[in-house]
Image: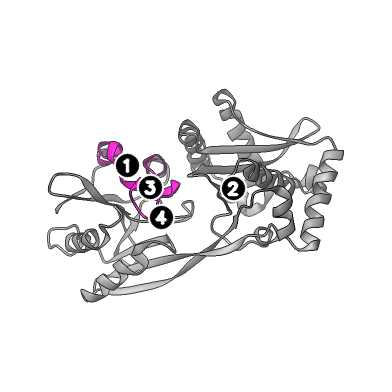
Amino acid sequence: MKTEWFTDVSALEKLKAEWNELLQRSVIDTLFITHEWQTTWWRNLGNGELRIITLREDDGKLIGLAPLFAEQGSDGLIYLSLVGCVDVSDYLDLLVAQGCEERVYAALLDVLTRDDFPAWNSLGLCTLPEASPANTLLKTMAEARGLKVQHHLHDVSPMIELPDTWETYLATLDKKDRHEVRRKLRRVEEAGGRWYIIDSAAALDQATADFIELHKKSRPDKNLFMDMRMQKFFAETAQAMFAQGWLQLLFLEVDGERAAALWNFIYHNDVLVYNSGYDPVKYGALSPGNVLFSHSIQDAIDAKRRRYDFLRGNEDYKYRFGAKDTKVFELRIEKK
């Protein structure tokens, strides 16, 4: 197997043609590991030095890709992390062609422990989905090499396995939650509310700006989160994801004014609920955020989507909509 590593940002562009093709051959294929997401994240939020490792068959076919970067901590140690880690990327992993995991992991560990590989002390693979082979196989292989390994639950991602009809979905909720969904939908309808999805590239910039403002209004912590750097990241992400047909930006409008917004991604027929916002001062009494979630779930059912994934975090509202937890892990490998 041929292995190389790159520290220059130009490697991101050089690998563009092969990146997503390998992702589609991997066990874990998620939007947050696409070339579009990873490059947008690095341009806007990346720090430190890239250390991208490629692993190829002897004929040159790419079968493994480790998009890593290195940062020096306040303790003087050098930490390797996955590009995208951690706050804004809900699922991350190494890219490995299915069926090649053992060979790729072995070659990757060989590279990482070579004397001429740039120095590092700790490798953190954050937000690994439960199905990732890294949780089991890479963990075991690293331990067998005498490396110090820590593996723990990072978070949960509640999701809904979508049924065939809206009424079937409502029947899965308990009586109180089902009543609340119907009551809130009816109140907004009586108030003249309407919801819609942004489907025009010409409307995207203004829609993104309106989403950001509603997000900031929602809660003080969201206002702090959405600083200028994050606003630029969202603006670039909107363009990149919309161009691929992956962005679903929804609004609930009351009296001609946008009262709530929902920032979803559609990827492999799953709805990924990435972020939301609403105006609690003007429209809080109408629960516009909850109403928009209800419309979004119904739209997903009508479109025959597979899952409605609320992504990481165990907020109560996700369970009131009937979501069930899936697990997300962190694997940390340290040199002794």
In the image: residue 211, left or right of residue 77: right
Q: Which residue type carries mark 1? A: Glu
Q: Earlier in the sequence, mark 4 or mark 1?
A: 1
Q: Position of residue 11 (x, y in %)?
A: 25, 41
Q: Which residue type carries mark 4? A: Leu
Residue numbers of the magenta segment: 11-39
Residue at the disc numbered 2:
275
Q: Are marks 3 and 4 in contact (CB under 8 Å)?
A: no
Graded by Cα atoms within 10 Å as few (under 14), some (14 to 19) or many (20 or more), the crowding at tag 3 reads some
Q: Position of residue 115 (x, y in %)?
A: 12, 63
Label ID, residue 21: 1
Figure coloring: one colour
Please, what secondary structure does the residue beneath circle 3 have?
loop
Q: Are marks 2 and 1 in contact (CB under 8 Å)?
A: no
Viewer-nearest of discs 2 and 4 = 4
Q: Position of residue 279 (x, y in %)?
A: 73, 43
Q: Earlier in the sequence, mark 3 or mark 4?
A: 3
Q: CA distance from mark 4 to mark 1?
A: 16 Å
Q: Relative to residue 4, is residue 11 depicted above or below?
A: above
Image quarter in which the C terminus is found: bottom left
Viewer-nearest of discs 2 and 3 = 2
Label ID, residue 92: 4
Q: Which residue type carries mark 3? A: Gly
Q: Earlier in the sequence, mark 2 or mark 4?
A: 4
Write the residue at 30% across / 37% down: 16
Q: Are marks 2 and 3 in contact (CB under 8 Å)?
A: no
* Nearer to the camera, 103 or 273: 103
Q: CA distance from mark 2 to mark 3?
A: 21 Å
